[in-house]
Image (cartoon, helix red, strand yellow):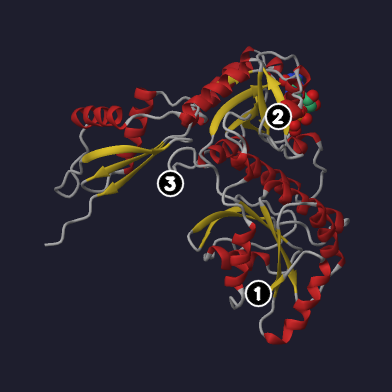
Amino acid sequence: MRAGRRPHRLPRPGGARVSAKPVLAVVGRPNVGKSMLVNRIIGRREAVVQDVPGVTRDRVSYDARWNGREFVIVDTGGWASDAQGMAQRIAEQAELAIAAADAVLFVVDASVGVTDEDEAVVRVLRRTNKPIVLAVNKVDDARAEPEVAAMWQLGLGEPWPVSALHGRGSGDLLDAVLAALPEAPAEQFDEPGGPRRVAIVGKPNVGKSSLLNKLARQQRAVVDNVAGTTVDPVDELVTVGGSVYRFIDTAGLRRRVREASGHEYYASLRTQGAIERAEVCVVVIDASEPIADQDLKILSMVEEAGKALVIAFNKWDLTDDERRRYLAREVERDVQAFAWAPQVNMSALTGRNVDKLRNAIEEALAGWETRVTTGQLNAFLGRVAAAHPHPVRGGKQPRVLFGTQAQNCPPTFVLFTTGPLDPQYVRFVERRLREEFGFRGTPVLVDFRAREKRRK
Ligand code: GDP
């Protein structure tokens, strides 16, 4: 079941088409103090996690801010410390982090020095051209400084001594992190009109790879011919119905993830990373099986990330009349909250309706980009308030003075009011906005600012 609360996020500054914040991935073997360091950076307690084998965490990314700049931290902890093939596993973790991030924070432990596992990460890190920041943790006092100097030998640039425990050095480290992160993620450097970024996500075995193969078999785009693209090796450009799309993290779909402890964790990390980088997500659900919590969770992830959404009910060829009746009921019961998303009943195996996906993707992107003029919006808000005024609360009746669309992608509205609005009223306004303006395939965020009381 989907959590009842919907996020009321504040609009990001900067107006139209603000692209996602830059992403920093934190990499290191267990017990070097990654989680504590992440906590230091985000200034909160919530990231406290242990490197427990096979643990699947809901959240792997956290919002962070330093010196007025915002970025996202992806914590790549959570792999098995007792596993065989440890070095291999760590190398994979580093690869994943590199794929998902704009810069990598690599954490080593001054009290232990460089281990074989660290070396495995270093080998992977050396191959990338993404910026690396090297943090040497557990430098609680000046006595550990010689250990720090020794870390130059890793060939990853200047080692930054920190104590996640005491906070020592974390300011300098964060400055180095900010210097390494791009102002905005790489995607933003694509020329306007470059390929739209699509992520195919969903739980294992629903047919994501099959769908990608089907699409790609129809036509693979020639990379050189597409203007303004530096294609990440994990992405693929595919022509669908005459337009080129950039499919995100297809390497993850093509390389079958090995069955291993922590494998679910990798899947969720990948899913989250792909969603963050995409503009529109195609969430693939296996129509032949009951809708699972995991399906709903992935739908929520897309909504919470503020991305356009298309729901693909795959394996339609395996459904009979009875199953379809059940599915309709499940959709009615569990997927209502996403009724705004276009749905396509398809089969990656037979190719049924695969071509309809393109229209659905375009429809969702159009909804996502919709801008409503302030005039239209306020005429609408006036009608809504006249027909359905806010209920009286504590003898007062909050009024909406005016509203504005703070940004699109996804459409985000701010209502200026005389007092706080009930969450139900905010949801009501959102529903009415959808009825009025459509917004097919996109989350819509509605926020309000209550007028400050004048001081006498
Ligand atoms: P992924 O883990 O989501 O990438 O799923 P795969 O693409 O690997 O598919 C999992 C299994 O389902 C494979 O055996 C596919 O052949 C099969 N499959 C995928 N799509 C369909 C479909 O539309 N119909 C049927 N009958 N089988 C499918």
Residue 221: tell me if it is visible.
yes
Instruction: From this view, report whether residue 207 is shown above or below residue 354.
Output: below
**Residue 211 appears left or right of 172:** right
Residue extending farthest to the bottom is: 143
**Residue 197 appears left or right of 376:** right
Residue 205: tell me if it is visible.
no
Total number of numbered labels? 3
What's the residue at 78%, 20% (across, down)?
A: 217
Decide: marks 2, 1 in contact (CB < 8 A)?
no
What's the residue at 82%, 67% (across, down)?
A: 154
Q: 61 or 279, which lies in front?
A: 279
For marks 2 and 1, the one nearer the N-term is 1
Quarter of image, res 294: top right
What's the residue at 24%, 28% (across, down)?
A: 379
Disc 2 target residue: 206
Mark number displayed over residue 9? 3
Instruction: From this view, report whether residue 196 is shown above or below residue 75.
Output: above
Decide: marks 2, 3 in contact (CB < 8 A)?
no
**Nearer the camera: disc 2 or disc 1:** 1
Q: Position of residue 234 (x, y in %)?
A: 75, 39
Q: CA distance from mark 2 to mark 3?
A: 31 Å
Q: 80 or 233, which lies in front?
A: 233
Q: 187 or 277, which lies in front?
A: 187
**Residue 56 appears left or right of 412:** right
For marks 2 and 3, the one nearer the N-term is 3
- The amino acid sitting under disc 3 is Arg
Disc 1 target residue: 162
Helix, strand or loop at mark 3? loop
